[in-house]
Image (tube, coloured by chain):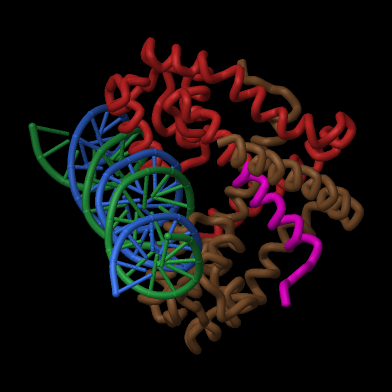
Chain colours: A brown, B red, C blue, D green
DNA sequence: ACTTATCAGTTGACAGGGCAAATGATCAAT
DNA sequence: ATTGATCATTTGCCCTGTCAACTGATAAGT
């Protein structure tokens, strides 16, 4: 009954794996009062601060509207600050934001990579990485193509 | 600056690829008035109808609350019906639901697999499938472990 | 100076989805 | 029959995210 081409099956497994992994990360991060999205936002901000909202949106591949709302929540929780100079807002971590990130970071990173390290040996990981790069690059090209033919 | 372990990089590419692919699918499905989530729900319902909400939630790996809302929207749009017998609601496609699905199905499937077929040859696809199966199964096991140790 | 692009960010309306508490319906045990 | 236990679904509250329309600020052309 089901539509079991190889790529369909692969796709399904990938989507579910990403789902499961995100859920595990969310469970894990709950003790720090963070979601995966927030964790990733904080990590990105730390690496590039001070950063504009537009750049942050690009870096995290979310829309401008999405980043605006997320940052509003992070600001409300006093994990980041937004300072407006001219027309641009520059985002930085607060003390509390940095502290939270640094508490969560190591275990989150470990949790994340364990999912790969436990399931695949080093050769397999390298192979997977190469395949994902191909797929990813191709999907980027497709998105760009869709964009221009708007 | 960035935390560039192999698994982190692989993870990032996988997440972005899934994002891009979903976005491409959403763009594609817009002409049929469907989202990816709705398309997948309709396809699943067609294959298993009549099906209970609980089973549907499991099949699509969303929570009970999530499925309840999504089905409410699909019912509002008259793509499905919910018939209550005893304590359970049985979901089926309406005429319009089936028709919409059948119009969208072939091109959506094609769009989906093209992303793999254009980027990877057959050997690579088989390798990827095997690796994803390993990862997926492992993530399922981890979720189960997290569940019991609640 | 005054209008017009243009760019950065916000906001309303919406879909998707999680969790936990509440409802409803059925079944089991007294 | 009545009280509980159990299961299916709903609902309130929240976060994530899109799109499109809107606001504000700056830059440019006349």
Q: Residue at x 59, y 37 (%)?
A: B24
Measuring from the top left, give residue A138's x and y in whole percent. 75, 42
| Front position in the image: A86 or A37 | A86
Quadrant where the image shows the C terminus of chain A: top right
How many numbered discs sit on the rendered protein?
Answer: 0
Measuring from the top left, give residue B23's x and y in whole percent. 56, 41
| Front position in the image: B30 or A149 | A149
Q: Residue at x 55, y 84 (%)?
A: A98
Q: Is residue A14 magenta?
A: no
Q: Residue at x 60, y 71 (%)?
A: A44
| Front position in the image: A13 or D18 | D18
Q: Residue at x 60, y 35 (%)?
A: A149
* Image vertical order of residue A41 relative to residue B96, above or below: below
Picture quarter containing residue A144?
Answer: top right
Left or right: residue B94 compared with residue A139 = left
Which stretch appears magenta?
Answer: B1-20
* Image vertical order of residue D4 relative to residue A145, above or below: below
Measuring from the top left, give residue A61's x and y in whole percent. 58, 56
Left or right: residue D14 compared with residue A117 = left
Measuring from the top left, give residue B60's x and y in whole percent. 51, 35
Picture quarter containing residue B8?
Answer: bottom right
* Image vertical order of residue C24 relative to residue A108, above or below: above
Asked if one can make out residue B86 in the rendered structure from this viewpoint, the answer is yes
Q: Is residue B12 magenta?
A: yes
Residue sitting farthest toward the bottom: A95
Picture quarter containing residue B73?
Answer: top left
């Amino acid at each position: 009954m089901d539509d079991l081409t190889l790529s369909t099956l692969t796709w399904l497994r990938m989507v579910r794996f990403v789902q499961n992994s995100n859920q595990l990360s969310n469970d894990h991060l709950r003790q720090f009062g963070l979601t995966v999205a927030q964790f990733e936002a904080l990590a990105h901000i730390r690496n590039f601060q001070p950063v504009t909202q537009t750049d942050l949106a690009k870096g995290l591949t979310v829309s401008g509207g999405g980043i605006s709302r997320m940052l509003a929540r992070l600001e409300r929780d006093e994990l980041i600050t937004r300072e407006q100079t001219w027309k641009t807002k520059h985002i930085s971590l607060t003390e509390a934001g940095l502290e939270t990130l640094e508490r969560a970071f190591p275990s989150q990173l470990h949790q994340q990579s364990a999912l790969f390290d436990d399931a695949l040996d080093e050769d397999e990981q390298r192979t997977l990485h190469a395949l994902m790069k191909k797929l990813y690059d191709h999907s980027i090209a497709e998105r760009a193509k869709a964009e221009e033919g708007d």
